[in-house]
Amino acid sequence: MSATPIPSDRANGSAIELSGVSSGYFRKAVLQDITFRISEPTVYVVLGPNGAGKTTLFRTIAGVLAPFQGGIRIFGESNETRSSREKLQYLSHIDGIPEGMRVREALRFYATIEGVGDDAVARALQLLDLEQLQDQYFGQLSQGQKKRVSVARIFLRDKQIYLLDEPTSNLDPKVAGEIRDLILRLSRDRVVLYSSHNLYEAREIGSQVIAIVGGRLSRFGRIDDIRTDRYVVGIRAMADHPALSAYRKEGDYYLAEVSGPESVPALVADLTAKGVQIREIREMENPLESLFR
Protein backbone atom coordinates (compact mmCIF):
# COMPACT_ATOMS: atom_id res chain seq x y z
CA MET A 1 0.00 0.00 0.00
CA SER A 2 1.50 3.32 -1.03
CA ALA A 3 2.20 5.90 1.61
CA THR A 4 -0.17 8.87 1.68
CA PRO A 5 1.08 11.48 4.16
CA ILE A 6 -1.55 12.84 6.53
CA PRO A 7 -2.39 16.38 5.46
CA SER A 8 -2.27 19.15 8.04
CA ASP A 9 -5.52 20.68 9.25
CA ARG A 10 -4.87 24.34 8.62
CA ALA A 11 -6.65 25.29 11.85
CA ASN A 12 -5.00 23.10 14.46
CA GLY A 13 -3.07 20.25 12.82
CA SER A 14 -5.51 17.57 14.01
CA ALA A 15 -6.68 14.55 12.02
CA ILE A 16 -9.56 13.78 14.42
CA GLU A 17 -11.04 16.20 16.93
CA LEU A 18 -13.95 15.49 19.27
CA SER A 19 -15.40 18.38 21.30
CA GLY A 20 -17.88 17.58 24.08
CA VAL A 21 -19.39 14.64 22.21
CA SER A 22 -22.31 12.72 23.68
CA SER A 23 -23.81 9.92 21.62
CA GLY A 24 -25.89 6.78 21.92
CA TYR A 25 -29.08 5.04 20.86
CA PHE A 26 -32.79 5.82 21.11
CA ARG A 27 -32.09 9.09 22.96
CA LYS A 28 -30.09 7.28 25.65
CA ALA A 29 -26.50 8.47 25.89
CA VAL A 30 -23.70 5.88 25.89
CA LEU A 31 -20.84 8.34 25.42
CA GLN A 32 -20.80 11.47 27.54
CA ASP A 33 -18.79 14.64 27.01
CA ILE A 34 -15.90 13.07 25.07
CA THR A 35 -13.16 15.51 24.09
CA PHE A 36 -9.80 14.65 22.55
CA ARG A 37 -7.60 15.54 19.60
CA ILE A 38 -5.48 13.21 17.45
CA SER A 39 -2.79 14.56 15.17
CA GLU A 40 0.12 12.11 15.00
CA PRO A 41 0.03 9.00 12.75
CA THR A 42 0.25 5.90 14.95
CA VAL A 43 -1.98 3.22 16.51
CA TYR A 44 -4.34 4.54 19.19
CA VAL A 45 -5.71 1.56 21.11
CA VAL A 46 -9.26 2.08 22.39
CA LEU A 47 -9.53 0.17 25.67
CA GLY A 48 -12.34 -0.31 28.14
CA PRO A 49 -14.62 -2.89 29.76
CA ASN A 50 -17.53 -4.45 27.89
CA GLY A 51 -20.29 -1.91 27.40
CA ALA A 52 -18.00 1.06 28.01
CA GLY A 53 -18.82 2.64 24.64
CA LYS A 54 -15.91 1.66 22.39
CA THR A 55 -18.08 0.59 19.44
CA THR A 56 -20.32 3.64 19.93
CA LEU A 57 -17.21 5.84 19.74
CA PHE A 58 -16.19 4.27 16.42
CA ARG A 59 -19.68 4.56 14.96
CA THR A 60 -19.92 8.20 16.00
CA ILE A 61 -16.54 9.17 14.52
CA ALA A 62 -17.44 7.31 11.30
CA GLY A 63 -20.73 9.21 11.04
CA VAL A 64 -22.93 6.14 11.46
CA LEU A 65 -24.34 7.75 14.61
CA ALA A 66 -25.01 11.47 14.92
CA PRO A 67 -23.95 12.90 18.29
CA PHE A 68 -26.63 14.22 20.62
CA GLN A 69 -24.33 17.13 21.37
CA GLY A 70 -20.82 18.25 20.57
CA GLY A 71 -18.96 18.05 17.28
CA ILE A 72 -16.47 15.92 15.37
CA ARG A 73 -14.02 17.24 12.82
CA ILE A 74 -11.89 15.23 10.40
CA PHE A 75 -8.94 17.27 9.10
CA GLY A 76 -10.86 20.41 10.00
CA GLU A 77 -14.15 19.39 8.36
CA SER A 78 -17.32 18.12 10.01
CA ASN A 79 -17.49 14.33 9.86
CA GLU A 80 -20.91 14.72 8.26
CA THR A 81 -19.37 15.85 4.96
CA ARG A 82 -18.74 13.37 2.17
CA SER A 83 -15.13 14.46 1.71
CA SER A 84 -14.30 13.78 5.38
CA ARG A 85 -15.94 10.35 5.29
CA GLU A 86 -13.91 9.41 2.23
CA LYS A 87 -10.78 9.82 4.34
CA LEU A 88 -12.07 7.20 6.80
CA GLN A 89 -12.17 3.41 6.68
CA TYR A 90 -14.40 1.84 9.33
CA LEU A 91 -14.22 -1.88 10.05
CA SER A 92 -17.08 -2.96 12.32
CA HIS A 93 -16.75 -5.88 14.74
CA ILE A 94 -19.72 -7.36 12.84
CA ASP A 95 -18.73 -9.03 9.55
CA GLY A 96 -21.57 -7.48 7.53
CA ILE A 97 -21.16 -9.83 4.54
CA PRO A 98 -24.15 -11.92 3.31
CA GLU A 99 -23.69 -15.64 3.89
CA GLY A 100 -24.67 -16.39 0.27
CA MET A 101 -21.92 -14.32 -1.34
CA ARG A 102 -18.65 -15.84 -2.48
CA VAL A 103 -15.49 -14.32 -1.04
CA ARG A 104 -14.30 -12.70 -4.28
CA GLU A 105 -17.83 -11.54 -5.07
CA ALA A 106 -18.09 -9.85 -1.66
CA LEU A 107 -14.76 -8.07 -2.05
CA ARG A 108 -15.70 -6.96 -5.58
CA PHE A 109 -18.92 -5.49 -4.15
CA TYR A 110 -16.98 -3.41 -1.61
CA ALA A 111 -14.37 -2.52 -4.23
CA THR A 112 -17.14 -1.05 -6.39
CA ILE A 113 -18.31 1.07 -3.46
CA GLU A 114 -14.75 2.28 -2.93
CA GLY A 115 -14.28 3.00 -6.63
CA VAL A 116 -11.42 0.55 -7.20
CA GLY A 117 -11.02 -2.40 -9.54
CA ASP A 118 -10.12 -6.09 -9.61
CA ASP A 119 -6.43 -5.36 -9.02
CA ALA A 120 -7.31 -4.08 -5.55
CA VAL A 121 -9.37 -7.22 -4.91
CA ALA A 122 -6.48 -9.44 -5.99
CA ARG A 123 -4.10 -7.57 -3.69
CA ALA A 124 -6.43 -7.90 -0.70
CA LEU A 125 -6.90 -11.62 -1.35
CA GLN A 126 -3.14 -12.10 -1.43
CA LEU A 127 -2.44 -9.97 1.66
CA LEU A 128 -4.89 -11.94 3.81
CA ASP A 129 -4.01 -15.33 2.27
CA LEU A 130 -7.54 -15.79 0.91
CA GLU A 131 -6.77 -16.91 -2.63
CA GLN A 132 -7.67 -20.54 -1.88
CA LEU A 133 -11.00 -19.41 -0.38
CA GLN A 134 -12.05 -16.86 -3.00
CA ASP A 135 -14.66 -19.12 -4.66
CA GLN A 136 -16.21 -20.34 -1.40
CA TYR A 137 -19.42 -18.92 -0.01
CA PHE A 138 -18.97 -16.69 3.02
CA GLY A 139 -21.37 -18.89 4.99
CA GLN A 140 -19.10 -21.92 4.47
CA LEU A 141 -16.12 -20.29 6.18
CA SER A 142 -14.95 -20.70 9.76
CA GLN A 143 -15.24 -17.71 12.11
CA GLY A 144 -11.54 -17.00 11.70
CA GLN A 145 -11.75 -17.13 7.91
CA LYS A 146 -14.77 -14.81 7.96
CA LYS A 147 -12.82 -12.30 10.03
CA ARG A 148 -9.94 -12.40 7.53
CA VAL A 149 -12.36 -11.62 4.68
CA SER A 150 -13.77 -8.70 6.66
CA VAL A 151 -10.30 -7.36 7.40
CA ALA A 152 -9.39 -7.66 3.70
CA ARG A 153 -11.88 -4.85 3.02
CA ILE A 154 -9.67 -2.25 4.68
CA PHE A 155 -6.89 -2.94 2.18
CA LEU A 156 -9.02 -2.33 -0.92
CA ARG A 157 -8.39 1.42 -0.96
CA ASP A 158 -5.83 3.62 0.72
CA LYS A 159 -7.33 5.88 3.41
CA GLN A 160 -5.84 8.31 5.92
CA ILE A 161 -7.76 7.19 9.02
CA TYR A 162 -8.68 3.62 9.97
CA LEU A 163 -11.24 2.73 12.66
CA LEU A 164 -10.81 -0.97 13.43
CA ASP A 165 -13.21 -2.51 15.93
CA GLU A 166 -11.62 -5.71 17.33
CA PRO A 167 -10.07 -6.74 13.98
CA THR A 168 -8.31 -9.83 15.37
CA SER A 169 -11.17 -11.39 17.35
CA ASN A 170 -11.80 -15.10 16.56
CA LEU A 171 -8.42 -15.42 14.85
CA ASP A 172 -5.70 -17.91 15.73
CA PRO A 173 -2.50 -16.33 17.11
CA LYS A 174 -0.52 -16.73 13.88
CA VAL A 175 -3.09 -14.99 11.65
CA ALA A 176 -3.79 -12.37 14.33
CA GLY A 177 -0.08 -11.57 14.45
CA GLU A 178 0.10 -11.24 10.66
CA ILE A 179 -2.85 -8.83 10.65
CA ARG A 180 -1.29 -6.75 13.43
CA ASP A 181 1.89 -6.54 11.34
CA LEU A 182 -0.11 -5.25 8.36
CA ILE A 183 -1.85 -2.70 10.58
CA LEU A 184 1.47 -1.54 12.03
CA ARG A 185 2.67 -0.92 8.48
CA LEU A 186 -0.45 1.18 7.89
CA SER A 187 0.17 3.27 10.99
CA ARG A 188 3.56 4.56 9.86
CA ASP A 189 1.87 7.44 8.08
CA ARG A 190 -1.80 7.07 9.01
CA VAL A 191 -4.01 7.31 12.07
CA VAL A 192 -5.35 3.95 13.27
CA LEU A 193 -7.90 3.56 16.07
CA TYR A 194 -7.89 -0.07 17.17
CA SER A 195 -10.20 -1.46 19.86
CA SER A 196 -9.23 -4.45 21.95
CA HIS A 197 -10.03 -6.22 25.23
CA ASN A 198 -6.50 -7.62 25.37
CA LEU A 199 -3.88 -5.51 27.13
CA TYR A 200 -1.04 -7.69 25.83
CA GLU A 201 -2.23 -7.16 22.26
CA ALA A 202 -2.68 -3.46 22.97
CA ARG A 203 0.92 -3.06 24.11
CA GLU A 204 2.15 -5.09 21.14
CA ILE A 205 0.49 -2.91 18.53
CA GLY A 206 -0.20 0.49 20.07
CA SER A 207 1.76 3.47 21.33
CA GLN A 208 -1.19 5.53 22.55
CA VAL A 209 -4.30 4.60 24.50
CA ILE A 210 -7.82 6.00 24.57
CA ALA A 211 -9.55 4.51 27.63
CA ILE A 212 -13.33 4.66 27.87
CA VAL A 213 -15.05 3.80 31.16
CA GLY A 214 -18.77 4.18 31.70
CA GLY A 215 -19.07 6.22 28.53
CA ARG A 216 -16.51 8.79 29.62
CA LEU A 217 -12.90 9.39 28.62
CA SER A 218 -10.81 7.89 31.42
CA ARG A 219 -7.33 8.14 29.93
CA PHE A 220 -5.66 9.57 26.84
CA GLY A 221 -1.92 9.17 26.55
CA ARG A 222 0.98 6.78 26.22
CA ILE A 223 0.14 3.12 26.59
CA ASP A 224 3.48 2.53 28.34
CA ASP A 225 2.16 4.55 31.27
CA ILE A 226 -0.48 1.91 32.08
CA ARG A 227 0.36 -0.14 35.15
CA THR A 228 -1.59 -3.07 36.59
CA ASP A 229 -1.35 -4.73 40.01
CA ARG A 230 -1.61 -8.27 38.70
CA TYR A 231 -1.10 -9.86 35.28
CA VAL A 232 -1.60 -13.59 34.74
CA VAL A 233 -1.01 -15.39 31.44
CA GLY A 234 -1.80 -18.95 30.48
CA ILE A 235 0.75 -21.03 28.59
CA ARG A 236 -0.53 -23.86 26.43
CA ALA A 237 2.26 -26.12 25.22
CA MET A 238 2.42 -28.74 22.49
CA ALA A 239 3.46 -31.26 25.17
CA ASP A 240 4.30 -31.31 28.88
CA HIS A 241 7.83 -30.23 29.76
CA PRO A 242 9.80 -30.16 33.03
CA ALA A 243 10.32 -26.40 32.71
CA LEU A 244 6.56 -25.94 33.16
CA SER A 245 6.46 -27.75 36.51
CA ALA A 246 7.05 -24.47 38.34
CA TYR A 247 3.65 -23.20 37.21
CA ARG A 248 0.18 -24.15 38.44
CA LYS A 249 -1.90 -25.89 35.81
CA GLU A 250 -5.51 -24.95 35.14
CA GLY A 251 -7.14 -26.99 32.41
CA ASP A 252 -4.86 -26.92 29.36
CA TYR A 253 -2.92 -23.89 30.61
CA TYR A 254 0.04 -23.35 32.92
CA LEU A 255 -0.44 -20.09 34.81
CA ALA A 256 2.37 -17.55 35.12
CA GLU A 257 2.12 -14.26 36.97
CA VAL A 258 4.37 -11.53 35.57
CA SER A 259 4.77 -7.83 36.19
CA GLY A 260 2.86 -6.86 33.05
CA PRO A 261 2.41 -7.50 29.33
CA GLU A 262 5.87 -6.11 28.63
CA SER A 263 7.34 -9.11 30.52
CA VAL A 264 5.63 -11.74 28.36
CA PRO A 265 8.20 -11.80 25.49
CA ALA A 266 11.00 -12.54 27.97
CA LEU A 267 8.96 -15.35 29.53
CA VAL A 268 8.30 -16.86 26.09
CA ALA A 269 11.97 -16.57 25.13
CA ASP A 270 13.07 -18.25 28.37
CA LEU A 271 10.67 -21.17 28.02
CA THR A 272 11.48 -21.62 24.32
CA ALA A 273 15.21 -21.70 25.12
CA LYS A 274 14.50 -24.49 27.61
CA GLY A 275 12.79 -26.52 24.90
CA VAL A 276 9.12 -25.76 25.58
CA GLN A 277 7.06 -25.74 22.39
CA ILE A 278 4.46 -23.05 23.05
CA ARG A 279 1.17 -23.35 21.25
CA GLU A 280 -0.63 -20.33 22.74
CA ILE A 281 -0.22 -17.49 25.24
CA ARG A 282 -3.36 -15.82 26.54
CA GLU A 283 -4.51 -13.52 29.31
CA MET A 284 -6.20 -15.60 32.02
CA GLU A 285 -7.55 -12.60 33.90
CA ASN A 286 -8.72 -9.36 32.37
CA PRO A 287 -6.28 -6.76 33.71
CA LEU A 288 -8.60 -4.02 32.51
CA GLU A 289 -11.13 -4.89 35.20
CA SER A 290 -8.74 -3.86 37.98
CA LEU A 291 -7.29 -1.03 35.90
CA PHE A 292 -10.66 0.63 35.38
CA ARG A 293 -12.40 -0.10 38.69
Image: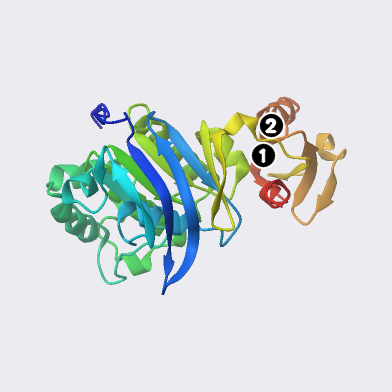
Question: What numbered label is drawn on residue 197?
Answer: none
The answer to whether residue 190 is visible is yes
Q: Name the residue under label 1.
A: 278
Q: Which three-letter amino acid code belongs to the residue tagged 2?
A: Val
Where, by quadrant of the figure, is residue 74 drawn?
top left
- Can you give x and y, in whole percent of width and height, for residue 253 in the image? 75, 50
Where, by quadrant of the figure, is residue 95 drawn?
bottom left
Mark 1 nearby-residue class (10 Å; few <14, some 14–19, many ≥20): some
The answer to whether residue 128 is visible is no
- Can you give x and y, in whole percent of width and height, for residue 19 in the image? 40, 46
Number of marks present in the image shown: 2
Mark in the foreground, 2 or 1:
2
The way the protein has been coloured in the rendering is rainbow
Mark 2 nearby-residue class (10 Å; few <14, some 14–19, many ≥20): some
Q: Quadrant of the N terminus?
A: top left
As rendered, which of 154 and 4 lies closer to the eye? 4
Determine the secondary structure under disc 1.
Answer: strand
Marked residue nearer the N-terminal end (2 or 1): 2
> Furthest residue to the bottom?
26
Q: Are marks 2 and 1 in contact (CB under 8 Å)?
A: yes
Where, by quadrant of the figure, is residue 128 drawn?
top left
Q: Mark 2 points at which residue?
A: 268
- Can you give x and y, in whole percent of width and height, for residue 36 in the image? 45, 41
